[in-house]
Image: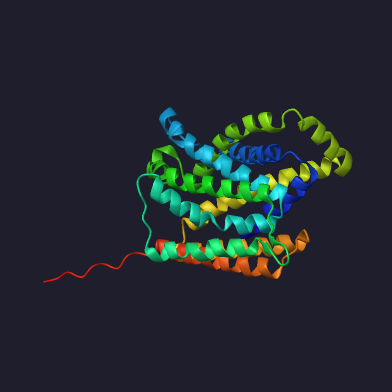
Amino acid sequence: WYAGNTMYNVYNKKAANMIHAHWFVAAAQLVVGMVWSVTMWATGLRKKPNLTAADITACIPIGLMACISHAGSVLAMGMGAVSFAQIVKACEPVFAAVVGLIVPPMDVKPMLAYAMLIPIIGGVGLACIKEGKGVDINVAAFGYASLANLAAALKGKLGGSVTKALKGDKSKNMDSANVYAVMNFISFFFTVPMVVIAEGSTLKEEWDHACEEHGAQALITNIALSGFFFYVYNEFAFAFTAQVGAVTSSVLNTAKRVIIIVVSSVMFMEPMTKNTVMGSAIAIIGTFGYSLASKAKAAPKKKTS
């Protein structure tokens, strides 16, 4: 899971640096996962999903949010530093908290969880302040990372009951791996129109330029490996987090973000100022605190005689 997530971020950034067609890169990554899933089903290594038209229809909104979340992350990391995108993505609990209150059924967290949003927002704000320059952010990267956060929050909100129902019906063969595979397919079908709209007119020119400058083999390799690691790390994450407790999951997710920020900063020589380090640390600790507080079970009330 950790290795796959780290390698995905590395190869995704390499691909994004080679070709300025980020919607295309996002779509191509999903294709790799689709090929993997079809191969697993065709060889019998994994049972095929047995879904009705109604089941697929129920999954469409979740797949749409998965599309926006994935593409938003790819665009954010393509237009800015990987470390900066990860720092902004630490704000995801803020979006999840707001969505939980606005989108029915209302999901009210303990007050301590909402208090943890303060260091998250404050930490991200501090990371955006450059010494001697004031607030200095990559607006496009910030916007796309925030869009990814909103979509991820909506995906979690909309998908909870649907995926639980699908997993609960054994006849549908929808374990964690197949749930993710189906969402991957739906996400791809939503991504393709955006490739056509946003990059269709310039895609061939961008591709030819990238091949001429970097070589077709290197470009295809980076896109393919980013797609492979994207699918593998998500599949492992789905399976692993379902087997461990809430606290363990929170610890691992927090550590994962730290590792990505450190590795990307070293590999891509992304500058980390004092404010960036302090801000990202505060935001990540706040995210960890929010995860623990939101998953904490309320103490049972004592019965009065």
| Image quarter in which the C terminus is found | bottom left
- How far across and down, in percent of the image, does residue 99 sit? 44, 48
Image quadrant assignment for residue 70: top right
Furthest residue toward left? 305
The location of residue 32, given as percent across then percent down, is: 66, 40
Residue drawn 42% across the image and 33% down it: 55
Q: Nearer the viewer, residue 88 or 31?
A: 88
From this viewpoint, is residue 228 visible? no
Horizontally, is 281 left or right of 203 in the view?
left
Residue 45 x, y percent position in the rendering: 56, 43
Q: Quadrant of residue 186?
A: top right
Residue pictured at 35% horizontal, 64% vertical: 297
Q: Is residue 180 visible?
A: yes
- The residue sitting at 68% across, 32% down in the picture is 198
Where is residue 200? Give x, y as percent.
72, 29
Count of marks placed on residues: 0
Between 199 and 134, the residue placed more toward the observer is: 134
